[in-house]
Image (spheres, rainbow, N blue to C red):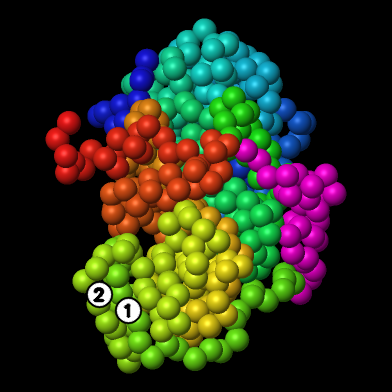
Amino acid sequence: MTDTGATTRAAGTAVERDRTVAVVGAGTMGQGIAQVALVAGHPVRLYDAAPGRAGQAAESLLGRLDRLVAKGRLAQEDRDAAAGRLHPASGLDELADAALVVEAIVERLDVKQQLFTDLEKVVDDDCLLATNTSSLSITAIGGALRLPGRFVGMHFFNPAPLLPLVEVVSGFATDIASATRAYETARAWGKTPVACADTPGFIVNRLARPFYAEAFAVYEEQGADPATIDAVLRESGGFRMGAFELTDLIGHDVNEAVTRSVWEAFFQDPRFRPSLAQRRLVEAGMLGRKTGRGWYTYDEQGAHRPEPHTADPAEPPAYVVVEGDLAPFGELLDMIREAGIALREEEEDHGTRLELPSGGQLAPADGQTSVEFRDVVYFDLALDYRKATRIALAAGPDTSPETLDQAIGLFQALGKKVSVIADVPGMIVARTVARLIDLAYEAVAKGVATEEDIDTAMRLGVNYPLGAIEWSSKLGRGWAYGVLEEMHERDPSGRYAPSLAHYRHSYADKQWENER
């Protein structure tokens, strides 16, 4: 039995190349996993409960290999050898010689439990049994087995032949040897495995929730429209896609179901609360690209979406006064100097902010709101302020037009497009990254996975520009905790309450001014 995902890093041996790998479920994911095992050199048996489906899937799989040959990515002789190792199966009894069985069937607990119960009657006791589930408990599926110690999760990402990440998930009863064998097998297949304990959503689907949730929350709070939020996440946050275009691609029925599953599995923890706006899309049948309409509309010509809000040109300020060290946003000071704008430094430290000639303040997103101050404009977090092409600003009803214009002009002088959003705490990128960091530290503290595996999973599983721990290191100890602490004060629902693990990390090296 394992008590932490890290234990699957122990030394072990992959399933031998000459041993049979069986894949149950001949849909898109099953075919993809079968292709990975086949190209890695294993004999592969492909089975599906629907009559004739395995044979059709095998033909489809060989067609994929033919396309790889045509593109020069696979030698003809390797394709022919793989074809000789691929065997469609018409019954479970034909999987008796398998050393590993990977299941990729419908996401229903009772159906999976029955399948593996039936498989145990067929395969040898040393056969490794694995599920590709993305949402069900490994412990619950394995709990129905006679030998639950050999049962493990091997969560591939779609398309399995292309995406490198495999989450190797240990259930409560999984033997370390079994988890290690699955881990080493995935690595032998050219994949990048990460070790994970059995927790709702595993690593990726658990930790990725804030990326969608905070974008939807800003929209529901009337902070900005989807196109603007997406543009800020891409052009300032460095994310490959914005949350709205990504969920349109995934399908809202799928994405919302995963969110709801994680929320319910965590006993309706407010940090994982689903979006009512997304629920309305699902109810309306507006599921994204596959139905032609979601947050945006789609047709044969592609996506149709409005332009993001971009401010009109404004004059830059003649000078800027800096108060505090502006950490971790210090690179902005060099950029302001390089843009030819005079920079004056005040010895009095009234916090981390810039003062504009209007007398108003320009401050980095910190979880507070402009309405709390006399004349303040907030600017959002960027992955890299030099490379960012867009910056979001937020102003309150008491912000003077002169201060806002000078803030817009300043960032335009730095070569950025500017999107002005409503006065929402944490803005867009800052609140998203702060919550990603918080969930990551909590997952590490609870033994879900190591810091290294969490960052690897987030980069490879959802293409984030940095892993959450990398973000934290870049922004400095305590930055994310401070943002969430301020947001929790303004929204005490529990959604933004920092975790105890995050608290301990943020204050571990704090030097107290007064002895207790």
Residue, far left: 515
Q: From the viewer's perspective, is residue 32 above or below residue 222?
A: above
Closer to us: 52 or 409: 409
User: Is residue 68 in sight in this rendering?
Assistant: no
Disc number for residue 260: none
Q: Magenta residues, as a range?
A: 273-301
Q: Quadrant of the C terminus?
A: top left
The image position of residue 234, as x and y in percent, is 52, 67
Residue, far right: 284
For the residue labelled by badge 1, is the local secondary structure a helix, a strand or a loop? strand
User: Is residue 373 in sight in this rendering?
Assistant: yes
The image position of residue 507, as x and y in percent, is 26, 40
Q: Residue at x 60, y 48 (%)?
A: 213
Q: From the viewer's perspective, is residue 239 above or below residue 287?
A: below
Q: Residue at x 43, y 57 (%)?
A: 366
Q: Three-letter amino acid code at disc 1?
A: Val
Counting residues from the start of the chain, the first of labels 1 and 2 encountered is 1
Q: Are marks 1 and 2 in contact (CB under 8 Å)?
A: yes
Question: Is residue 409 rendered to the left or right of residue 25?
Answer: left
Q: Which residue is tagged 2? A: 346
Question: Is residue 123 rendered to the left or right of residue 255?
Answer: left
| The quarter of the displayed image where residue 385 is located | bottom left
Q: Neighbour class for label 2 at 10 Å: few (<14), some, many (≥20)? A: few
Q: From the viewer's perspective, is residue 125 above or below residue 77?
A: above
Q: Which residue is tagged 1? A: 321
Q: From the viewer's perspective, is residue 22 above or below residue 322?
A: above
Rounded to the nearest whole Å, what is the CA distance between mark 1 and mark 2? 7 Å
Q: Residue at x 55, y 61 (%)?
A: 371
Q: Neighbour class for label 1 at 10 Å: few (<14), some, many (≥20)? A: some
Instruction: Examine the structure image and report whether residue 148 is included in the region drawn in magenta.
Output: no
